[in-house]
Image (cartoon, rainbow, N blue to C red):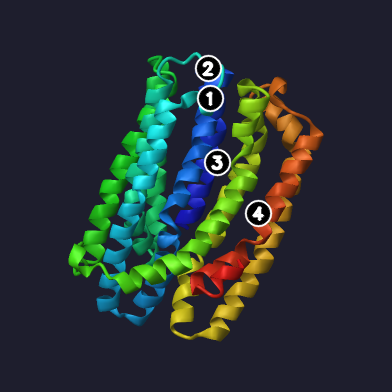
Amino acid sequence: SASYVFIVFSLLISLLLVPFILKYLTDPEYAVFVIVGDLIAWAGATNLGINATFNSKAAQVIGKKDFQELNVLYNTTFFGHLLSSLLIIILSIFIFINPEFFFTNIKEGSIELVVMILLGSFYVGYITQPLNSLLIADKQVHIDNYLKVSKLIIQTSLTIVLLILDYKLLSLAISSLASNVLMSLVTVYRVNKSFPLLKLNLKKFDKITMKYLISKGAWFTLGSIAGILIFRIDAILISKYISLSLVASYAINLKLFQIAEKFHGIMFNTTRPYFAQSYGKKEMTTLSKMYNSSYYLSIFFAFFIGITIVIFSKWFISWWVGPNYYLGDKITLFLFVNFIIQTTVLPNRVLLVSTIYKVKTH
């Protein structure tokens, strides 16, 4: 299926691109790119969970074929999401004025420009997230995965060319911005074609619907922030209190687990619209069967791939980028525990988020 094509292709690109990038960037420069990725994760929490709630609610409404309600829900989500993007602008201005707060001992002269382009790239994708969620709620995940493959090809090709032309960190920033702009334009076209009756209209913004989205989504945001504090602050702390160069080694050791977590998420998050629509149709027997299958498959996959990474991590990193980047068996073991904790709870979160059931408790 399309999801597996994307998984395999992403794996190959990730494994081939990292050592190529390290040939053209210093360890501190690569560390800057890693830290900006963590900052983007922080920026993603600024939408107050509006999009997460819309993702689940839209699938339920589509399942009921209530397009009048969908129109109100869509417009309320989009304009509420757009308003929340002001927080990203504020964050970007703070980083531009105070880059030394996150990046120490870096001699890259264009650091502010690089960070602003990367955050701008994220912003472009951020404002079209509700549109993409609408397509996923309509079970168009397979098309989305094929488009992600195309985006990855464009972004990777552009990165390689710009690195060879000695654009250094700007290579990663420019390629990210260009591919995100292109993908956003395609997303707008797909929504207009799939939902011709849905039109953006500020008059369709509904305060009651907005209150519902925020009341449910705020708890998703708290969950996201908790996850960020646990899993997305390590590179920043290593940079600030130990060494910016060490961030590169840490990112390399973490990379295989990140790839595994990403693929695990793709495999099981694709079930969200099916869970949501079954719940919307009150098909509880089908919902129960899907959850049980998803739960046991998730645990099996997580332990299998995690143990495999632990066994081969030292050999692979030494072959992949060089033995100097391997941080030791203890670090690998801690990363494995971190991976298992994150992945084994995913099926439960998929079910709860898809049905918007007791969001305060998870």
Q: Is residue 287 above or below residue 272?
A: below
Percent across and percent down for residue 136 are 39, 62
SS label for mark 2: loop
Q: Nearer the viewer, residue 100 or 167?
A: 100
Q: Earlier in the sequence, mark 4 or mark 3?
A: 3
Looking at the image, residue 198 sits to the left or right of residue 146; the answer is left
The percent position of residue 297, horizontal first and vertical second, equals 66, 64
- Label 4 element class: helix
Quadrant hosting residue 290: bottom right
Q: Tell me the distance, in whole angstroms, between the alpha carbons under discs 4 and 3.
A: 20 Å
Residue 2 place in picture, x, y as percent: 45, 55
Q: Earlier in the sequence, mark 1 or mark 4?
A: 1
**In the image, residue 155 above or below residue 59:** above
User: Which residue, given by chain and number where applicable, does mark 4 sit on?
Assistant: 342
Percent of width and height locating residue 27: 58, 20
Of mark 3 and mark 1, the one earlier in the sequence is: 3
What number is the disc on residue 106?
2
The residue at which mark 3 appears reads as 11
**Upstream in sequence: badge 2 or badge 3:** 3
